[in-house]
Each structure stands twice: as structure tokens, then as C-alpha cells.
Image (tube, grey):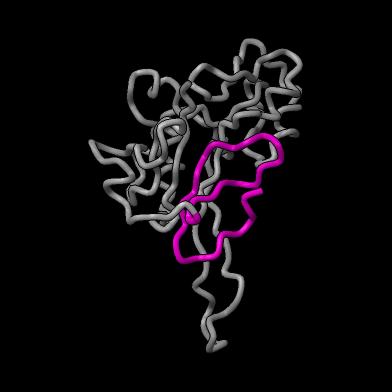
Amino acid sequence: MTHYAIAVDVNRCVACMACNGACKMVNNVPIGNFWNKVLRIGPNAPDPDGVHAGTDFYYLPIQCQHCENPACVAVCPTEASHVLEDGTVQIDKSKCIGCQFCAMACPYGVRYLNEEERVVEKCTLCEQQIAQGDVPQCVKNCVGMAKWFGDLDEGIETFRGVGDYTIGDFCEPFEESDVHMLPDVGNRPTFRYILRGKTWEGGDQ
């Protein structure tokens, strides 16, 4: 069974926002809305000298997590929100009535109402590209090569980026304890975040 997802090497993300801009261009995301965002997490405390700002911070790209048990699908009254065989969560705009129940149910706040079309939108993992064997645009345009795409069932070491690289071949080694996900409230998010040598905030549960 396939379940496409993204793995982010958080140590490599520099918050350049290239993923954000590329996504908006390719998917025609309206001005003021975003299918992906980059947050700064921390710093939580100053360095030991008490003078300089803390360095225990990182940048965290956030978008639809294409959950295994998506709350947005469970609350959709028209089945506009649905899960494809590849594990991605998609929206059938012809069925969407703009009620925004899905946006309220999403624990990550990554859905929004397209005011012009009166339908809800979000990251599709560039379904139009992955169906052709390509990678999502945010992965393709990640200048720090922090974002990687693949089938979660095959292990994140196999996730690929631009060209023939895989995360296992290109990035620094990581342990299982370095791999995190956003808080799981029963929806089972599939995206993975690799963070070494810093304090992961938000918890994995």
C-alpha cells in the first residue's frame, strides 16, 4: 500500500521561503493565502553566558500532513475531502460547499477558504505532478535540499529530492530518536521531521 509523504531535514532548512513561493506559483494560490508556511521555533532560553540570544531554534515548514486518519475527511458532509489510493488527502471542488468544517477540524490550521471560488483549499502534494512520477514543487525548489518526497511504507531513507539523490544518500546520518512528527490527536500525521542536536518542541504525541 502506498502512502506518499514528505520528510524534512530540519537542520538544513534556512527559511528561505523558496518552497512557499514555488507552491503559490505552480498551484495558483491566492494572494494572502498559503499552502505551506515556515515557522521559527524557539529560542527558548539565552546561551549560558546570558548575553547572547539562544541558538536552540530551528525553522519548521508546515503544510497539510496528509494524515492516515484525517479529521477533515471525517467531518466533511459532502465527501469533498477524501483520501486517494496513494494516501494523499484531496478536495473535490465540485462537491465542496465552503462550510469550512474541515478547516475547523484540522489540528494544524493548514486549510483556508478561497473567497473567490468559495471552496476550501490546501496542499495537494502537487498531485498533478506526483501522478506523473515527479516530486512536489516545494521539494523540487528547496534550495537547502531539506525537503524529500516518497512512500512512507518504504521508509524515509528512500525519499528522493531533486535528481537521483535520496535523503539517505545525501543528508547527514540520523537516528530513530531524531525523527519526529507534529502532535498526533488521533489523525496520525504522515510527514516526518528530522532534527539533530536541538530540542524538538511540540511533542510527538
Q: Give the quadrant of residue 13.
A: bottom left
On screen, residue 54 versus residue 161, left or right, reads right
Q: Outermost residue, front direction? A: 176
Looking at the image, which residue is at 26% across and 41% down? Answer: 165
Q: Give the quadrant of residue 189.
A: top right
Looking at the image, which residue is at 52% across and 24% down? Answer: 87
Pick whichever, 121 or 169, lies toward us: 169
**Looking at the picture, how far across and down is residue 127, in whole percent?**
45, 22
**Looking at the picture, how far across and down is residue 147, in whole percent?**
40, 44
Looking at the image, which residue is at 71% across and 28% down? Answer: 102
Q: Give the quadrant of residue 166.
A: top left
Image position of 47 with respect to 122: above or below = below
Q: Outermost residue, top direction? A: 94
The magenta stretch is 177-205
Count every numbered label the image shows and give the total.
0
User: Is residue 1 highlighted in magenta?
Assistant: no
**Looking at the picture, how far across and down is residue 199, in whole percent?**
55, 64
Looking at the image, which residue is at 46% across and 66% down? Answer: 197
Pick whichever, 46 or 196, lies toward us: 196
Image position of 71 with respect to 132: above or below = below
Report the magenta stretch's main SS. loop
**Looking at the picture, how far across and down is residue 108, in whole percent?**
65, 42
Q: Outermost residue, left direction? A: 164
Image position of 94 with respect to 133: above or below = above
On screen, residue 179 versus residue 189, left or right, reads left
